[in-house]
Image: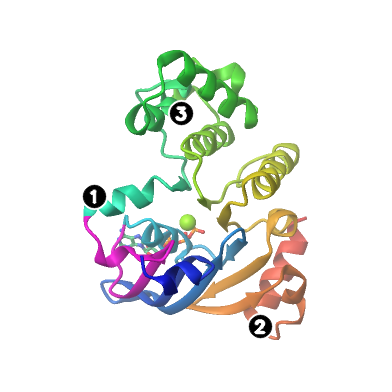
Amino acid sequence: MNIEAKADDSAIRLQGLSKSFASQHVLDSIDLRVRRGETLTVLGRSGSGKSVLLKLIIGLQKPDAGSIEVDGQDITRISLTELNNIRKTIGFLFQQAALYDSLTVEENVAFPLRRHTTLRTAERTDRVRELLARVGMEAEVRKMPAQLSGGMKKRVGLARSLALDPKIMLLDEPTAGLDPITTAEINELIQDLQQERQMSFVVVTHDMLTVNAVANRVVMLYKGRLVFDGAPGEMKDSGHPFVSKFLREAEGRD
Ligand SMILES: Nc1ncnc2c1ncn2[C@@H]1O[C@H](COP(=O)(O)OP(=O)(O)OP(=O)(O)O)[C@@H](O)[C@H]1O
Ligand SMILES: [Mg+2]
């Protein structure tokens, strides 16, 4: 890593990032920086490319053009081994939680610890219990994913994404489908992690409660571009018709 990269306080830096599927331009030359310790929320209507954006950042999809720097390293120009090392520093919560169906809740959360640490069984069990307790799932350790509700799967996915103490968390709809009390608990967990560990977060959400609880900054994706980039409180004065429409609809839902 060169000195310039070290001096930069970006956790993530996207430049000219474009991604199309066939003739569909999902992301069109996006520039975006997430500072260390910052929580950025990403808004946008269904199909606007929010999940694609997160998958590009973790290298699960390849961009057509542009660079993706994570902690100063352009992940589009490194080997798979190097990419896997960077992935260990990123916690990823998929929109559908993506638990391993044939593993119990406990085994799902233990999976990254087994694979990437030398913890002994007893230590690993303790760590898994601690992680599940943080998301209120400690009573469900023996269940299989098929026996969980959507919100419970999400919470287990969140526990698993925290297992390796990541520096960056990418959360795809962490509170979608959760009741207001569980939503508030997840938002509090994110706030605790911000304070305790100064993690950087990118949170995709359509939930303004989550935005207002956790975001330092909000961006809005619309037709492949970022049409808003600012503090949550500035959204109402954005002047962009889609941002105003989004806020009106969100207020109507509350
Ligand atoms: N692997 C893929 N192959 C083809 N098209 C894809 C693929 N992944 C995503 N897309 C398309 O890219 C667009 C953006 O998808 P994406 O999943 O990022 O939307 P989103 O903003 O996350 O929507 P939602 O809020 O519904 O989750 C969609 O039109 C989708 O059909
Ligand atoms: Mg999505």
Which is more N-terminal, label 1 or label 3? 1
Asked if one can make out residue 8 in the rendered structure from this viewpoint, the answer is yes
> Which residue sits at x=40%, y=61%?
57
Is the residue 180 above or below the residue 4 in the image? Answer: above
Label 1: how many Cα within 10 Å (few below 14, some 14–19, many 20+): few
Q: Provide the residue span drawn in magenta.
A: 61-79
> Which residue sits at x=38%, y=68%?
68
Residue 208 in the image: state x and y as whole percent: 71, 59
Q: Label 2's element? A: helix
Picture quadrant of ligand 1: bottom left
> Which residue sits at x=48%, y=63%?
50
Residue 184 in the image: state x and y as whole percent: 74, 43
Provide the residue designation for mark 1.
81
Horizontal side, residue 194 vs residue 21: left or right: right
Mark 1 vs mark 2: give the one in front: 1
Provide the residue designation for mark 3.
109
Horizontal side, residue 77 vs residue 36: left or right: left
Q: Amino acid at mark 2?
A: Pro
The Cα–Cα distance between marks 1 and 2, rounded to whole angstroms, is: 44 Å
Q: Amino acid at mark 1?
A: Thr
Residue 229 in the image: state x and y as whole percent: 62, 76
Q: Amino acid at mark 3?
A: Val
Residue 146 in the image: state x and y as whole percent: 45, 25
Label 3: how many Cα within 10 Å (few below 14, some 14–19, many 20+): many
> Residue 241's mark?
2
